[in-house]
Image (cartoon, coloured by chain):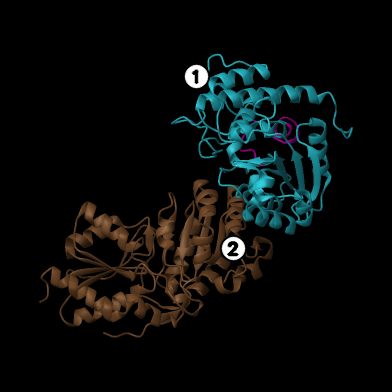
Amino acid sequence: MGGETPTELVPSLETTAREIRQEVIRMTYAAGGGHPGGSLSVADLLTALLFHEMKLDPARPDWPERDRLVLSKGHAAPALYAALALRGFLPREELVTLRKLGSRLQGHVDRNTLSCIEASTGGLGQGIGIAVGMALDARLAHRSNRVYAVLGDGECQSGLTWEALMAGGHYRLANLVAILDRNGLETDGPTEAIMGIEPIADKFRAFRYHTLEIDGHDFGQILDALAEARRTTDRPTAIVARTVKGKGVSFMEGQPSFHGRPPTKVEAEKALAELGGSLAGVAR
Amino acid sequence: MTEVRQVESLRDAYGTALVELGERHSDLVVLDSDLSGSTRTMQFGGRFPDRFFNVGVMEPTMMTIAAGLALGGRTVFASTFAVFAAGQAYNSVRQSICYNHANVKIVATHGGLLVGGDGGTHQMVEDIGLMRGLPGMTVIVPADAPTTRAATFAVAEREGPAYVRLTRESLPTLPDGVFRIGSARELRGGNDLTIVAVGALVARGLEVAEELARVGVSARVLDFASVKPFDEPALLRAARDTGAILVLEEHSVLTGVGALVASTTSENYPVPVRRVGVPDVFGESGEPWALLDRYGMSTEHIREEAWELLKARGKVQ
């Protein structure tokens, strides 16, 4: 790690991320649906954002000066809901209602039912544009808040993503950070086999982003990159976070099949055993 | 009673109203995608450069950026041609704006066949159907410049997403009246037939109604500029009072106002309804008003359709 992140932070962030991963397994098992693979890959990034980097106050979800997070890869909803619950924005017991009729926890993140969600997303390529709009809004209003957009790598095949990134670069939105969860897999297989997005960091640079490449599971590197983004005042920052889809569960890691498939009961129990959790009390 | 009506640009009315709104509301922001001269947002851009974003040719992302700006509490206007606003950008309008209840007002110019020479690729005749199908969307199709001005102010005042469809061509200014969202405007009273019309065809509907009056047929004319929400009581009153409805729109008859009128009356008070509009085809290049004639929206054809309805009701031989 770059040395500027207090090392004592890391163990507690790792513990939090592990709890988020446990919840992701419980939630997707209970729902009988959802996207565990991309939720597990993004868990460390979300933990670093919500539990360290971002200015937030669970008691005031509408605080104007709060930092904004737009989960452009809206299918990683389980991870964000779990992180928000652990951060105090919603009751943890509610997590297992994911995708159930009447639940506030919609299959893709939804601000209509949950006020701590900044923007409903799901159709890929749109969240980054919303984040650009939010960053422009903050600049116009002379607010100091920052805007974080978390992208999936599949959506980097969408022209919309690049339109929005182009706008962020053009307007020199230094308050905008685009974080790419580069787990390498999309629904049908590896991104590079389906429609290659590499060299992705060069693309961000060409779109006028201060671009950093990190290990998206190394909290030292994540926090350092976020700190560097904060110090970058003349343009937006892009963080290419190399991650592992299904991270934390041995038999889910690197498996495209877990992009959009929930674990079976046996798989969920096994996964939770690896993560130090339990499926007790969770029914599908 | 042939009266010469003044012809005015709807786009100019929009551009001027937008500047006035900008003066009143310091948080109001306007976006365009490289058509600001044509859509007239350029006037706002010149007056308030800090609050104007010409994002270039990225209509779907103009809508997502607009949503992001609006979620911070701003009123946002976004303009481009109808084919790009409702067509190219449809899913961004659906998810980022409507699903998020973002306070974005899409004012789309160049709706319908009156685009003229640019041809079928640019003549958007499906937008009313696409936009009125979106939950929470307000849809307004002004028929003249004063209504455009009033509608611009009205959608700015009303919280939530809106789609306002303007024509490229200037249109005759209608008799004085007040535009209100949700209200049909009765331009002419009558009890033998009702003509429900939007946009460029309102003036043609009035013309036909005036002709009919000369032979003793009284046709009610409703300007249905507020397509969503629409004035259901006025529509059903017209069905009851006149027993037949002729719908005029420069839009596909499959999904537009005709479809709305036919389904609403058949559920509540069935009467014969005939739809004049664009059949299930794309347009082509041509002189704007000649295109309306060519695709079945000539004054003559409107008159024929009116007679068919009157005959069906036994009101003429």
Q: Main secondary structure of the magenta part?
A: loop
Q: Which residue is at the far right?
A: A3
- Mark 1 or mark 2, which is nearer to you? 1
Element type at marker 2? helix
Cα distance, mark 1 to mark 2? Answer: 55 Å
Vertically, is A2 above or below B101?
above
**Residue A222 point in image, percent of width and height:** 79, 35
Q: Amino acid at mark 2?
A: Gly
Circle 1 Cα neighbour tier, 10 Å, few/some/many (<14 / 14–19 / ≥20): few
Horizontally, residue B132 falls left or right of residue A105, namely left
Q: Which label sits on residue A283?
A: 1
Label 1–label 2 contact, CB within 8 A: no
**Residue B62 point in image, percent of width and height:** 60, 58
Q: Locate residue B175: give its quadrant.
A: bottom left
Vertically, is B203 above or below A154?
below
**Rendering colour (chain B):** brown
**Residue B154 point in image, percent of width and height:** 46, 60
Residue at x 63%, y 26% (from the top left corner): A88
Q: Amino acid at mark 1?
A: Ala
Element type at marker 1? loop
* Residue position for label 2: B22
| Segment colored magenta | A48-64
Residue at x 16%, y 82% (from the top left corner): B215
